[in-house]
């Protein structure tokens, strides 16, 4: 009966705890980036009540953190006769998912084989990115944990921070050797009924290890830079002081950035191709924070036009485009163009928001030199040139005639402009001899430029005959005629 009542009380406590609306400290949300692997003693030496209290403690300890890649990743590895990975570091990306998983963990029982579990922990933590902090949090009753000194030393040598919580009757000397200094904030011995009193201290110790104290440059141009950091101040409390200057300059610029939950700032009016140093100091009357710093070099200056291209080329037109478009830095654009080598130069003036224009009235088959220049607001002028070619005019046929010759034959004659001519392309519909109901087939032939006529046979009724001139740069416009066969099938018209 007592066991049943105890289980009911535990179940009620867990439900109440999971349903509580716990206020999350603003200094914890989005504060950190790192991996935390919980090594939970789930062996038979741990009482059911003690195991449940450890899970509740873990739930409350981790509740304030933002989870997922780029934040905090949490895994749970149970210690028993054989280690059991309850969930890996990459599984839970939000608190709802994590809290649900923690509420459904079942105790393994069995022996306390901590050594085997540590080998699994070593594999899990060494697979993670080396540039993020890694923590192994060991929750144990400390009863005969085994020979863990060598494995713990290897983990610490690989950059893993080891923290431990023992429920009083543990082997304190083993725990002392296992954890990463300082012992006063990384090792806790506490009665299981009072384990919640260490929650804040242990969480602060974890935050000190995985706090993402980095000032990053997330967007960089020749004249600006956007700096980003994780907020460490509460909204409405405190501010950030940013100081930045170019390397070698002794008098820095200073910016005061309210409110406390700010996380980015844009620096403008920077010099191109210049190295800057920036430092960010959170100011608060509640606690001291580290000053963050970063060095960056602005991009070389890009003055429009940096790129000029040609498109939509025709016999008498061509489109010219340029970039980048810089309406805040450019007063106007000028486009000059003339035939090569010594053609008359024409000029087009365009506003600062235009980055293309269609040049018309050009000479066919000609090469042009096109120059785009920009007058900048600072008085500087930049120009870039490109060559553009117009297409040749491809003369069309002057005439096309179809003349009946005899039964089933037609003479096709044409006239064309001879300059640059390479030949003719002739096509017609041919009668299909296999079946009277079959569709006619299309026949074609290429003829030399000396040809001005040819004879076609077996044309389909109402056959369409087309002749096109062929030039070195393409095919010109052709002419088509329809050859009508009379009802007696022997005469054409």
Image (tube, helix red, strand yellow):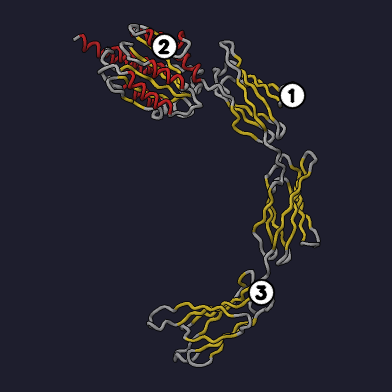
Q: Nearer the viewer, mark 2 or mark 3?
A: 2
- Disc 2 from disc 3: Cα separation: 94 Å
Q: Nearer the viewer, mark 1 or mark 3?
A: 1
Nearest the eye: 474 or 81: 81
Contact, mark 1 vs mark 2 (Cβ under 8 Å): no
- Disc 1 from disc 3: Cα separation: 69 Å
- Asked where in the image residue 156 lies, by quadrant, the reply is top left
Tag 3 or tag 2, which sits nearer the N-term? 2
| Residue visible at 75% across and 57% down in the picture | 369
Q: Residues within 10 Å of mark 3 (few under 14, many from 20)?
A: many
Asked if residue 338 is positioned above or below residue 384 in the image, the reply reads: below
What is the x, y in percent for residue 28? Answer: 49, 19
Tag 2 or tag 1, which sits nearer the N-term? 2
Provide the residue designation for mark 3: 395
Q: Nearer the viewer, mark 1 or mark 2?
A: 2
Q: Residues within 10 Å of mark 1 (few under 14, many from 20)?
A: few
| Residue visible at 69% across and 57% down in the picture | 358
- SS class of the residue under badge 1? loop
Q: Is residue 384 left or right of residue 146?
A: right
What is the x, y in percent for residue 420? Answer: 68, 75
- SS class of the residue under badge 3? loop
- Disc 1 from disc 2: Cα separation: 49 Å
| Residue visible at 45% across and 78% down in the picture | 441
Q: Which mark is residue 109?
A: none
Provide the residue designation for mark 2: 177
- Asked where in the image residue 304 lies, by quadrant, the reply is top right
- Asked where in the image residue 11 lies, by quadrant, the reply is top left
Provide the residue designation for mark 1: 249
């Amino acid at each position: 009966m007592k066991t049943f009542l105890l289980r009911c009380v535990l179940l009620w406590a867990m439900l109440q705890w999971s349903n509580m609306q716990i206020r999350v400290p603003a200094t914890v949300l989005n504060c950190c980036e790192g991996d935390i692997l919980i090594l939970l003693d789930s062996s038979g030496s741990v009482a059911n009540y003690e195991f449940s209290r450890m899970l509740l403690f873990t739930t409350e300890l981790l509740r304030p953190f933002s989870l997922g890649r780029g934040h905090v990743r949490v895994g749970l590895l149970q210690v028993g006769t054989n280690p059991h990975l309850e969930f890996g570091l990459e599984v839970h990306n939000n608190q709802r998912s994590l809290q649900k998983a923690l509420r459904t963990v079942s105790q393994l029982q069995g022996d306390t084989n901590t050594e085997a579990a540590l080998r699994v922990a070593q594999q899990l933590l060494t697979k993670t990115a080396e540039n993020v902090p890694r923590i192994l949090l060991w929750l144990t009753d400390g009863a005969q944990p085994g020979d863990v000194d060598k494995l713990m030393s290897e983990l610490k040598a690989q950059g893993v921070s080891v923290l431990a919580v023992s429920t009083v009757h543990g082997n304190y000397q083993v725990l002392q050797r296992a954890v990463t200094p300082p012992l006063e904030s990384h090792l806790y011995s506490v009665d299981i009924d009072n384990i919640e009193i260490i929650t804040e201290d242990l969480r602060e110790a974890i935050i000190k290890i995985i706090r993402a104290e980095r000032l990053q440059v997330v967007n960089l141009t020749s004249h600006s830079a956007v700096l980003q950091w994780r907020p460490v101040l509460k909204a409405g409390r405190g501010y950030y002081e940013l100081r930045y200057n170019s390397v070698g300059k002794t008098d820095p610029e200073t910016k005061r950035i309210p409110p406390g939950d700010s996380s980015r700032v844009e620096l403008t009016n920077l010099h191109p191709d210049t190295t800057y140093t920036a430092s960010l100091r959170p100011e608060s009357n509640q606690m001291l924070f580290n000053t963050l710093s970063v060095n960056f070099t602005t991009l070389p200056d890009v003055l429009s036009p940096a790129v000029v291209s040609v498109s939509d080329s025709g016999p008498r037109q061509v489109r010219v485009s340029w970039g980048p478009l810089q309406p805040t830095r450019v007063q106007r654009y000028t486009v000059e163009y003339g035939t090569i080598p010594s053609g008359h130069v024409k000029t087009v003036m365009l506003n600062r928001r235009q980055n293309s224009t269609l040049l018309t009235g050009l000479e066919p088959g000609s090469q042009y030199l096109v120059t785009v220049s920009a007058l900048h607001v600072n008085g500087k002028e930049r120009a870039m040139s490109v060559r553009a070619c117009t297409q040749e005019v491809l003369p069309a046929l002057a005439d096309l005639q179809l003349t009946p010759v005899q039964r089933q034959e037609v003479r096709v004659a044409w006239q064309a402009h001879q300059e640059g001519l390479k030949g003719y392309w002739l096509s017609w519909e041919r009668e299909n001899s296999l079946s009277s109901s079959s569709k006619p087939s299309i026949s074609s032939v290429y003829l030399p430029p000396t040809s001005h006529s040819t004879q076609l046979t077996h044309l389909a009724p109402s056959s369409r005959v087309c002749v096109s001139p062929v030039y070195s740069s393409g095919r010109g416009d052709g002419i088509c005629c329809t050859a009508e066969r009379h009802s007696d099938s022997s005469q054409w018209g």
